[in-house]
Amino acid sequence: MRGARITGRGRRRQGDGRDAGWRARGGRLSETAASEQWRTILSGDDPGLRWLRATWRRVPGTPRCKVCAAPFQGPARLLARLALHGRSPLNPLMCGMCMRALRRHPGGAEITGSVLFADVRGSTGIAERRPPAEYRRLLQGFYALATAAIERRGGILDKFLGDGVMALYVPLTAGRGHAAQAIDTARDILGDLRRAGGGLADLGVGCGVHTGEMFVGALGTDDRLDFSALGDTVNVAARLGSLAEPGRLLAGLAAWEAAGRGAPEGVVRRQVVSGRDTPLDVVHLELTPDAGSRVPAGAAGPPPAQPTR
Ligand SMILES: [Zn+2]
């Protein structure tokens, strides 16, 4: 590992003016060494980026850089800019420092993490019944509410999807309980929506969560680079999010078990996930803000239900 290393002391990192989480010492790392460093960072075993995130999160300012948590709003955004952590013009969800780090250290690692998708159901009909500005206001309200819930639970707001959001939960940000954090974020989002005013309670949102191996790191081309994740775990979570009816969470059984919540609260169905050869055991939950979870009324209905527990 001769080309670059992760600095061990976060205090030095913030001021070194080069990368967030990395410090180059010459040429590029070999692919294997870079992957190992990515794994160290994403697993939360390196104190550098963990320290930086913890420091930035002490000051208010949502939204934040999805990698280092530097604030992009509020008074602290000026501090972030002075520390070269202002919003990147190439990716509005990342700061300039993290974007530079991604370009200097492209790659990533396969790690175990969790993914959440929260999608607005029936958005076409909602848009049809409202003026465009009103529809935008509703979506903006949903984005703000979901972003706050994701941040509270240690998730990384990965992207906005037109009428939904995708969030990553890796040990670096969410600890070893990343699956529980992803599931609880879904509860928070659906609960907060039902309590919210301004018409937000009328937005039907369904959530999907899955846990497993995924590739996390730099994705895209040099001028359109992003920090994100891909793989079967991400695809399954996306599919579950699109299948979930309003007010419901569909969680892969692997996610539920990783969350350590004991026997599933809802119904478990063996579900065929489009495009996938192997059916998946999925926990179906209807989430209510005050009463927690309950078995959805339709969960014991007709096929493809095939209870496995
Ligand atoms: Zn950053």
Image (cartoon, rainbow, N blue to C red):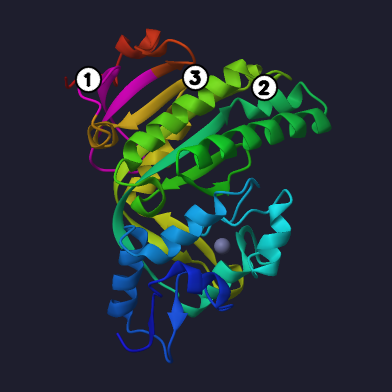
Does the segment drawn in magenta span residue 276? yes
Q: Residue drawn 71% across and 18% down?
A: 199
Residue occupied by mark 2: 200
- Residue 10, visible in the rendered structure: yes
Which amino acid does the dot numbered 3 rest on? Answer: Gly
Q: Position of residue 137 (x, y in %)?
A: 76, 32
Does the segment drawn in magenta span residue 147? no
Q: CA distance from mark 2 to mark 3?
A: 13 Å
Which amino acid does the dot numbered 2 rest on? Answer: Leu
Q: Which mark is residue 247?
A: 3
Q: Residue drawn 25% across and 43% down?
A: 277
- Locate residue 241: give its quadrant: top left
Left or right, 230 with reference to 145 = left
Determine whether 253 is above or below 171 in the image.
above
- Dot 3 surroundings within 10 Å: few (below 14), some, or many (20 or more)? many
Q: CA distance from mark 1 to mark 2?
A: 34 Å
Left or right, 242 with reference to 33 = right
Q: Residue drawn 41% across and 50% down?
A: 173
Q: Residue furthest bottom?
A: 26
Left or right, 128 with reference to 63 = right
Q: Quadrant of the N terminus?
A: bottom left
Give the mark nearest the N terminus, 1 or 2: 2
In terms of secondary structure, where does tag 1 sit?
A: loop
Q: Quadrant of the C terminus?
A: top left
Q: Nearer the viewer, mark 1 or mark 3?
A: 3
Q: Residue furthest left?
A: 309
Residue occupied by mark 1: 306
Determine whether 228 is above or below 85 in the image.
above
In terms of secondary structure, where does tag 3 sit?
A: loop
Q: Which residues are magenta?
A: 261-285
Q: Residue drawn 36% across and 84% down?
A: 29
- Dot 1 surroundings within 10 Å: few (below 14), some, or many (20 or more)? some
